[in-house]
Amino acid sequence: MNPPVPDSSAQDQPIYVTQPQLAPLAEFIPYLEQIWENKILTNGGPFHQQFEQALCDYLGVEHLSLFANGTLGLVTALQALRITGEVITTPYSFVATAHSLLWNGIKPVFVDIEPQTLNLDPAKIESAITPQTTAILPVHCYGQACDVAAIQKIADNYNLKVIYDAAHAFGVPADGGSLLSHGDLSVLSFHATKTFNTFEGGAIVCPDAKTKQRIDHLKNFGFVDEVTVVAAGINGKMSEVNAAFGLLQLKHIDAALARRREIAALYCRLLADVRGIRCLPACDSERSNHTYFPILVGPEFPIGRDALFQKFRDRNIFVRRYFHPLISDFPMYRGLQSAQAGNLPVARNASARVLCLPIFPGLKDEDVLRIAAIITEC
């Protein structure tokens, strides 16, 4: 299908790969006024407590601990489960996934990904397990669910913990309950680029009250009360301003998710017949939050991925090669045996072919047409 040519008057307007969804400013003012009246800015104030419960209700989980950002959540999750030694993870993610391991003195072991979902490949995990392996750290990449049953079976067989980096997975449904309930812990990010944001923020989804209590201690310097410290914790607390904004954002998230679905479905229709362009399987699925819209540029396409990337930049459209380079290619990781190129052929191929197209609730249909036209005109 060839899309109509968009209005030329819009051609010079920049389009970014994402744009934060912001609730109306006027609706936020009453929350700020209450904070100014309470004069409680942090340390588990009333908005913090309300937001934790509201998120549990919305996401369908029982226990959740809010954080200042998702990276602190990952670092603390590993501390909470006392993970040591080696952890199996994916090279195809944002660097915070592996960095959280280094911050805990843990050796990352990179395993290749599935070609269809670009998630950690369960079939490759067992051969990477050693006596030093203590956990698996998969990522629900682009909001597509990992094969949680296969990963859990391996973890049970080898007595390993499973911590999911669920930074992309806000609101993603799963059979039999919340996707976030799988594994021992799931870590969310509420960064400005995410489907749901609180300016900055994050959370750890916990299986029980005891685990939540330990995590709550760790994110507040290890304090139990005014005179008792039980762990070498950090300051990972979410502020009242962020929590209040999160409460407001929850009122608008369903509309935002619905608009993302519409945009993804339009992309899928426009690009369905373009030879050499592959949209990932969940691109128009009801089981995705469409936090990103990735395409893979194949050898059948007339120009390479980087040439197409430049065409977009020349038109003031800021697509992303996301994830390129692989985490395993960065200097602090490339010396690891598991980071060697021959061990990660699927991840390396995806990294060389991927482009994430703009998707966010404020993106107009005519902008989607403009973006698709750049691809189809090739």
Image: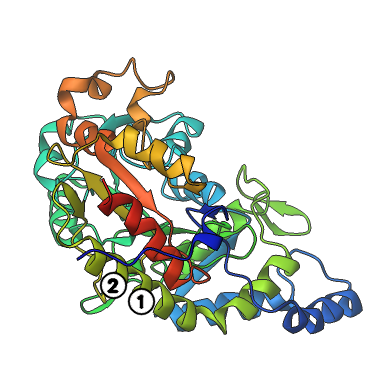
The relative height of residue 238 versus residue 289 in the rendered view (above or below) is above
* Nearer the observer, 206 or 261: 261
Q: Position of residue 296 (x, y in %)?
A: 23, 46
Q: Position of residue 220 (x, y in %)?
A: 67, 54
Q: Position of residue 86 (x, y in %)?
A: 31, 31
Which three-letter amino acid code belongs to the residue tagged 1?
Glu
The residue that label 2 is drawn on is 265
Q: Position of residue 376 (x, y in %)?
A: 26, 53
Q: Quadrant of residue 180?
A: bottom left
Circle count: 2
State the SS at label 1: helix
Quadrant where the image shows the N terminus: bottom left
- In the displayed structure image, the side of residue 284 where residue 60 appears, left or right: right
The residue that label 1 is drawn on is 262
Q: Residue at x 51, y 68 (%)?
A: 196
* Cβ–Cβ under 8 Å for marks 1 and 2: yes
State the SS at label 2: helix
- In the displayed structure image, the side of residue 34 where residue 334 appears, left or right: left
